[in-house]
Image: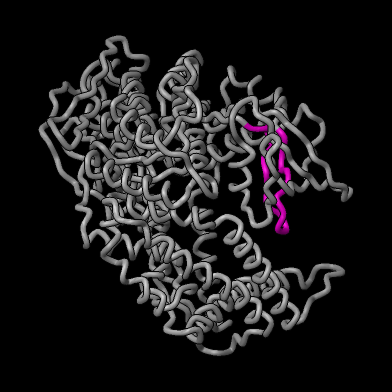
Amino acid sequence: MLNRKVLPLVLVMIFAGVFWAFQSQGENGKSLTTQQKILTTLGSIIEQNHYSPKPINDAFSKEVFKRFLQSLDPDKNILLQSDIQALRKYETTIDDEIHGATLQFVPAVNDVYNKRLLEVSTLYKDILKQPFDYSKDEEIVLDNEKTVYGKNEAERREKWRKKLKFMALERYTDLLDQREKNKSTKDYVAKSDADLEKEARDKVSKIMDKTFDRLKAKFTDEERFNVYINAITSFQDPHSDYFPPVEKRSFDEQMSGRFFGIGASLREEDGNIKIATLLTGSPAWKSGELTVGDVVLKVGQGSEEAVDLTGFAVEDAVKIIRGTKGTEVRLTLRKQDGSIKVVSLIRDEIVQDEVYVRSAILNGKQKIGYIYLPDFYADYEKPNGARSASDVAREIIKLKSENVEGIIIDLRFNGGGYLNEVIQMVGLFIPEGPVVQVKDREGKPTIYTVNEKNVLYTGPLTVLVNEQSASASEIFAAAIQDYGRGIVLGSSSTYGKGTVQRAIPFGKPLDFFSGRTEFGAVKLTLQKYYRIDGGSTQLKGVIPDVVLPDEYEYLKIREKDNKNAMPWDQISKASFRKWNGTVNLSEVAQASQQRVKSNTNFQLLDKNAKWLAEQNNKIYSLNLEKYRAEQQAIRSTVKQNEKLTKLENELPFEGLKADNSKYNNVDKEKGERYKTWLKNLRTDIYINEATAVVSDMINAKKSVAKN
């Protein structure tokens, strides 16, 4: 995902102004009048600004109608076919509502949905009272696209029976396996099949209780309206979204690595939300009133009435505990001695530095630096806020001070981030020239360039990517590849996202610092970007110089697997000069590919990945023996894959000298996590091949120098 923080001022003022003129009413500030305004304004924004807007007409309405109902009831086990038929009178009126007609569709859906939800919230309890017969030869289809809504209550009940039976079967099988594993353990008391079967149903019952508690507590009429808005935006393309205020704040926190909270992490246990850890120096730690294991019952904002967390997931609780710096949050806790205590805390800045760039050194025959970048993050709200490009620069300086001869940049699972950061980061490795071309719906491309004649690092370079390396990651990998600056290694292609989004605010500003507004924002695709060779990364992604088989290769998780993805295209090539390196990169890449082909781990991993992907499309048996056989085969393959991706002989990775105090003296748990991270590097088969490639580049460079 690419985002540009600064919007055209006129655009911001126009859409903020729409909401200045009226006051909100009703729950959480979204009356039907407000919802109507949001809907019509959204339609205007899409039609006037989206890179390639779909016509908002009857065909559009039909698709949004289907997508919205699928989002509300993905398993098609809450609504009935008669409900869908009754709602079809709105199937071609959604475009009219977007263009100003009275909002009727969502209120009508809410009435039906609330009624059906109440019915099924008691249905599962009745079904789970009786034991399941796992000797029957029956099956369940879990692919939502291949299922249909029940014709009547009896069919809906049957869908629930099979769903609950499948959930119980999963747990029953696990319990049987545990009994088999522990049967020889001293003093172990084995339970009967009947007892284990009941225990499995009890586990499912607790899960469903929690699920329906959350639906009742969180999935309100207003939340369903948000889902409706997202059905409209995501139909334009997969990366256009609507963010209500809390979600917008959460998005900003993710992009900046900074938030305002209390410094306590949470976990869910036995249906309760508990304090998991306390960050040293944070408000929670300083208060001395919170203890790991305390149950958080309620959360209150200042003097407002506290919100009961029954039915909340951990992420829901986190979002309401966080807020604005200097504001009060009140936690109602059940202490471990059973007492109830209300603790008042003042939110302060919490920096998530573990989501920032970090590096390590391979201290082998050659010193090779390793830089891990999880996102192209930036905190533009602070003049001295974290910036991924400048942070990477600091890591390079630290690595150079320890005399590394080559560097690996790891962008696996890096989903992207800010455009400006990736442009600046390319400038750390390439002296001058274009980095990326960006085009909006109107005109010819804008070429973004770097002009750093004294680049920070000129040595051997490899870039690691995979299927989830997206957007800004793909810009970086493509630039390195197009310039011939280094070698890109990874899965057969990266994610394939070649679009640029910007957040457009709704409503009155909440403050004059963050840019957040009363009704959140819509993140809309306004531009597409292209490689300097003219090709888009959209759908195709970046094809690495060296392909490394992995366990995700055949899963349908790339951009090209999304039906609403925008098409691939190309534009004219930008003028640029290739990197004047002394190493023949194609020879190094060919040597690497030969190693991969002869590596039995990589080849077996590829075979297993293909087989596992095929299992995702299967119809599942509800017969115990058949299910156990299927699951045993899957578990054995997954376990084998875990072993295949780990090296038997560890790589000699160590932390940087400059990082000793950062991870060893301040926070013990943080230090332990850092040590675990280093340990994982030492056994990573992909990093091993990347180091081999860098080593070949170092040797080739030395060989040229001798000659």
Instruction: Say which quadrant the C terminus sits in.
Output: top left
Q: Residue at x 16, y 30 (%)?
A: 445
Q: Position of residue 180 (x, y in %)?
A: 71, 73
Q: Residue at x 49, y 40 (%)?
A: 245
Query: Going by the image, does 522 lie left or right of 445?
Result: right
Colour option used: one colour
Whether residue 66 appears in this view of the structure is: yes
652 vs 170, nearest the viewer: 170
Note whether 5 is above or below 1 in the view shown. Answer: above
Note whether 126 is above or below 557 in the view shown. Answer: below
Query: Going by the image, does 346 lie left or right of 3?
Result: right
Instruction: Say which quadrant the N terminus sits in.
Output: top left
Q: Which residues are magenta?
A: 261-278
Write down the quadrant of residue 218 in the picture.
bottom right
Q: Residue at x 40, y 24 (%)?
A: 406
Q: Position of residue 566 (x, y in %)?
A: 23, 49
Write down the quadrant of residue 350 in the picture.
top right
Residue 624 within the magenta-colored segment of the rendering: no
